[in-house]
Amino acid sequence: MKQPFVSVIIPVLNDFKRLKICLKALEQQTYPQELYEVIVVDNGSIENIELLIEKYPRALLTYESKLGSYSARNHGIAISSGEILAFTDSDCLPTDTWIENGVKALLSLPNYGLIAGKIEFFFKRFNAPTAIEVFDSITNLQQKKYVKEYHFGATANLFTYKQLFEEVGYFNSDLQSGGDAEWGGRVFSHSYVVSYSEDCCVFHPARNSLKQLIKK
């Protein structure tokens, strides 16, 4: 069976250091390198994201002027070449089998609409998480719960088909948060399967301040 081409889409706003780590992880994927591209959508950064992208030949930098991560993702979707789209964020660290396992999960049933992959939290001090970090890790980005109870997956770790956006519409770019839940609801209402994958994993930093918790 021919493996599909995958477009990884990452919105970014002034997150140079963590984006660098994310891009490095995406260079080390087990999925064939000629079968995926990485689209970084700059959503108004002051930091020189272009300087970073130049060091990663698999990455393509593009720009979206309308503020909001869903506007940025929509722009990435519009210019993508992939049959399959994989979404993550600049502060995430994908495992080396992330693309391979995400594609495998999505292709495992013909009526799968989206795969929500596992999001594993890590802490600033590995063995000594703060109370805020622990709280964030048990209340935020709970993909299995999102799928089971609400029929969506967070865009920090999401695989789907580009064709699906043509059928159910793009993300609602007027939303600053919750756009993944709103879009997932549309997918589910079109009778597609929304599923969770334990093997398709990214690592995500737990928020470690009240200010960050309030912003989420």
Image (cartoon, rainbow, N blue to C red):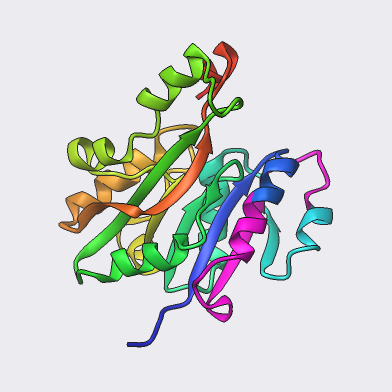
Q: Position of residue 180 (x, y in %)?
A: 38, 42
Give the farthest residue toward the bottom.
1
Q: Is residue 44 visible?
A: no
Compared with residue 93, is residue 53 higher up or lower down, i.e. above or below?
below
Q: State the extent of the magenta-drawn residues as a range.
A: 22-49
Left-right relation of 93 to 14? left
Locate the N terminus and report the quarter of the image it occupies. Answer: bottom left
- Which sits in the foreground, 154 or 17? 17
What residue is rendered at 47% in x and 48% in y?
Answer: 202
Q: Does 24 lie within the magenta span? A: yes
Q: Tally the numbered discs.
A: 0
What residue is rendered at 42% in x and 78% in y?
Answer: 4
Q: Is residue 174 visible?
A: yes
- Which sits in the foreground, 2 or 121? 121
Q: Position of residue 89 (x, y in %)?
A: 55, 45
Q: Position of residue 22 (x, y in %)?
A: 62, 51
- Which sits in the foreground, 149 or 27? 27
Q: Does 16 lie within the magenta span? A: no
Left-right relation of 43 to 115? right
Give the farthest residue toward the left.
191
What residue is rendered at 68% in x and 42% in y?
Answer: 18
Q: Position of residue 49 (x, y in %)?
A: 78, 49
